[in-house]
Image: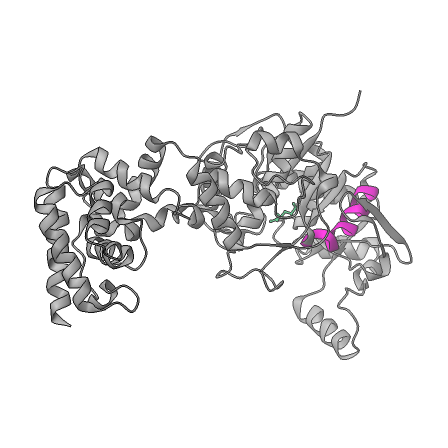
Amino acid sequence: MSKEVRVRYAPSPTGFLHVGGLRTALYNFLFARKKQGKYILRIEDTDQARIVPGSLENILQTFNDFKLNADEGPYWQDGTQSRGGFGPYSQSQRLDIYKKHAQELIEKKAAYYCFCNPARLEELRKNQEAQKLPPKYDKQCLTLSGPEIEAKLRAGESHVVRLNVPSDQTIRFTDVVHGEIKISSNEVDDQVLLKSDGFPTYHLASVVDDHLMQITHVIRGDEWIPSTPKHILLYSAFGWESPQFAHLPLLLSKTRKKLSKREGDVAVRDLLEQGYLPDALLNFIALLGWNPKTKDEIFSLLDLIEQFSLEKVNKAGAVFDLDKLDWFNSVYIRKMKPEELFAKTLPYLVKAEIPVSMYPTEFVSEILALEKDRLRKLSEIGERVMYFFKDPTYDAKLLIWKKSDKQIIIQNLEKLLELLKTTKPTEDNIKKFISDNEMKTGEVLWPLRVALTGVEASPGPFEIMKAFLVLPNGREIILKRINSAVANLYKI
Ligand code: GLU
């Protein structure tokens, strides 16, 4: 029987979750579900200085929003309790475990105490820089004798523990995405494993935890490839089998550079606040580096679980294109049921100071139905429908269709006003009016639409009037706006 698949997402709580982090979490989640394994959340909080309060809560909340809750990890919200049999899942609560393992490496001569002070290390670095050599510790403390080390430790001298990287070895590992990767051990620095404050570095902590938590596959961003040889050395020093590695491609901007904030490298929470729907965002993010090798682009979480495989993860960087995200979002908005659209857009209407509660629900629903096919993100809604709630101020020139004559436009609108005093403003009635009077369609419908909205782009005038007619005073609003448009035309 093959081993149960166990994967982990191991963020450092140094800020709110960004798209790259969500992608890593998602791929781990999908792989675990596909293989019927376990997906673990581990908090790598050993760099105490970089901790940002609230990060863990943000990760847990985001997982909840995306239905990506971990099978094991720090318990919901407070982070102090954990669920799963391999806890605690926050590294700051596992310090004794790392110390014990560092000790084991020292005994095996795979690691050693280093007492060099920052001034010496700085000088070493400068000399190497001057000689154009890569910065590397020179193993000076490896020459200390047992009694010398004892004496220094007894005297309470500040120290770290370093990995004793052997020289002239080829370190190799097979990455599921990148294939075989090899590097000479001469290029690997004697990495600090335990810092002077007794905290482990990422390298020691993550290897020890991946082993003790029985992680079978390490799925993480490409930026960790240079660290992996150190991890391979650690696994072999401990005599442990190393997990399989899969490094995910970088996220790039459209210009193929590092993703900037403007181009979408924002906290996932900000994207949700802008009104990107979780399902759309997840669908979009899933395709950043994973190629389903089908024509389809729309995948639910269940579809993704069914189709995901690490073998279909690309090596090359994935372009994060906000326009594409807008497209996905609009597809998902179009699929929403009216009640759902109402509930989801309500906070944005309120934010735009639209007094929704003063209007009949049918009116708001009618308006939302009009905008549904045009919306790219929910936050656009207030601006798009404002004219329904607030009388427009006109740029009178906008009322004139193309190169038409102002007088004709005025005349047409005045005639239309006459008609609408006695006739209902419906599509059929207005179309008949246009043909009976032999008017040009554009010279009626364009100024009518602008009279009703004041804006350059909107749904058509018939749809807008239909929505207004839901209101008891809808007809008056329509007449008032056409009147006021005419008055504005006289002024230019
Ligand atoms: N704590 C690391 C990070 O913040 C985890 C890297 C890994 O998955 O090994 O990304």
Taking the spot 56% from the left edge, 32% from the top edge, the residue there is 301
Prevalent SS, magenta region: helix
Taking the spot 55% from the left edge, 33% from the top edge, the residue there is 300
Q: Which one is in front, 414 or 99?
A: 414
Q: Quadrant of residue 157?
A: bottom right
Q: How many marks are shown on the rendered structure?
A: 0
Quadrant of the image containing the C terminus: bottom left
* 233 inside magenta stretch: yes
Quadrant of the image containing the N terminus: top right
Q: Which one is in front, 154 or 464?
A: 464
Q: Is residue 415 above or below residue 45?
A: below
Is 281 placed left or right of 304 in the picture?
left
* 200 inside magenta stretch: no
Q: Quadrant of residue 216?
A: top right
State the image coordinates of residue 358 (x, y, percent, origin top left): 15, 39
| Start-end of magenta stretch | 223-237
Is 297 placed left or right of 52 in the picture?
right
State the image coordinates of residue 11 (x, y, percent, origin top left): 58, 45
Q: Which one is in front, 344 or 160?
A: 344
State the image coordinates of residue 366 (x, y, percent, origin top left): 27, 37
Q: How is the image coloured?
A: one colour
Q: Is residue 283 above or below residue 135?
A: above
Answer whether residue 45 is visible to the viewer in this image: no
